[in-house]
Image: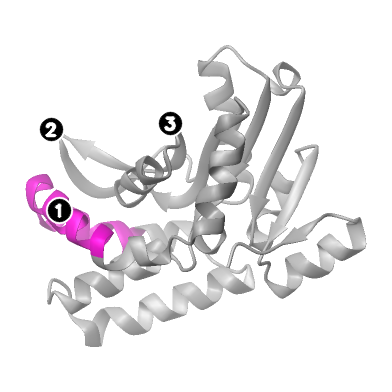
């Protein structure tokens, strides 16, 4: 049995679903562009630089979920999938996921983006297992806070190991393991798998991959 992990944003997607969800809400007039966009851009740059404070970002990112009913949010997400997400899914990404699924590998999308945004995207790829940052819910509605450990940097390792334990697995359960990612933020988890793969990597990850002899590939 093999384990295959996929980062989502800018790895399987030719773009960032977190960032685009915020842009989508601005376009709909749900949030004020003048107030929200500068912060959205700042957090995005901090993420790319590896300096993001994940708690500050989640306080910012999850707040709009608490202001609207789940029914309305789900309706907006269907529109978001059609207009924003599907155009970011390239055929090579679909083919890579299909290759591992057809081989019988245990496939997991593991992402810092929250599960409300990403669960339908995982379904679109046909990936059963999703490890994402979990928004807190009360009576089926979002509170605007995060639940548990954010799936970010070392948090991805903690969340992955919790997920393995829930399935009665450990690292030793898998003959081989892969992780496909674009981001320097995923270096901790890339170092844990047998086959780390840099996908359209940022400059820091590319340099690390070259130095470490990791394969580099493109899904664009």
In the image, which is nearer the foreground, mark 3 or mark 2? 3
Looking at the picture, how far across and down is residue 121, in whole percent? 36, 49
Q: Identify the residue shown where x is 64% and y is 45%.
A: 154
- Secondary structure mostly seen in magenta is helix
The residues colored magenta run 59-82
Of the pair 142 and 217, the residue shown nearer to us: 217
Residue corresponding to mark 1: 73
Say if 33 sits above or below 97 in the image: below
| Disc 2/disc 1 C-alpha distance (Å) | 15 Å
Q: Secondary structure at mark 3?
A: loop
| Disc 3/disc 2 C-alpha distance (Å) | 25 Å
Are the residues tagged 2 and 1 within 8 Å (C-beta)?
A: no
Q: Identify the residue shown where x is 10% and y is 55%.
A: 68
Of the pair 144 and 197, the residue shown nearer to us: 197
Say if 38 sits above or below 69 in the image: below
Tell me if mark 1 has few (under 14), some (14-19) or many (20+) residues whose alpha carbon lies within 10 angstroms of its own. some
| Disc 1/disc 3 C-alpha distance (Å) | 22 Å
In the image, which is nearer the foreground, mark 2 or mark 1? 1
Residue 66 covered by magenta stretch? yes
Q: Identify the residue shown where x is 11% and y is 53%.
A: 75
Q: Secondary structure at mark 2?
A: loop
Residue corresponding to mark 2: 139
């Amino acid at each position: 049995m093999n384990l295959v992990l996929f980062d989502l944003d800018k790895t399987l997607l030719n773009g960032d679903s977190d960032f685009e969800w915020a842009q989508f809400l601005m376009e709909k007039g749900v949030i004020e562009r003048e107030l929200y966009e500068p912060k959205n851009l700042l957090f995005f740059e901090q993420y790319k630089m590896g300096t993001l404070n994940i708690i500050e970002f989640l306080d910012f990112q999850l707040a709009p979920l608490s202001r609207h009913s789940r029914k309305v949010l789900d309706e907006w997400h269907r529109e978001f999938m059609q207009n924003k997400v599907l155009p970011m899914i390239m055929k090579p990404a679909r083919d890579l996921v299909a290759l591992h699924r057809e081989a019988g590998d245990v496939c997991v999308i593991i992402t810092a983006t929250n599960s409300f945004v990403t669960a339908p995207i995982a379904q679109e790829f046909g990936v059963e297992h999703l490890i994402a940052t979990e928004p807190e819910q009360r009576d089926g509605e979002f509170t605007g806070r995060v639940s548990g450990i954010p799936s970010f940097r070392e948090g991805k390792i903690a969340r992955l190991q919790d997920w393995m334990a829930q399935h009665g697995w450990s690292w030793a359960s898998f003959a081989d393991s892969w992780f496909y990612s674009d981001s320097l933020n995923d270096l901790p988890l890339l170092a844990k798998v047998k086959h780390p793969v840099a996908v359209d990597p940022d400059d820091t990850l590319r340099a690390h991959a070259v130095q470490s002899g990791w394969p580099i590939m493109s899904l664009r």
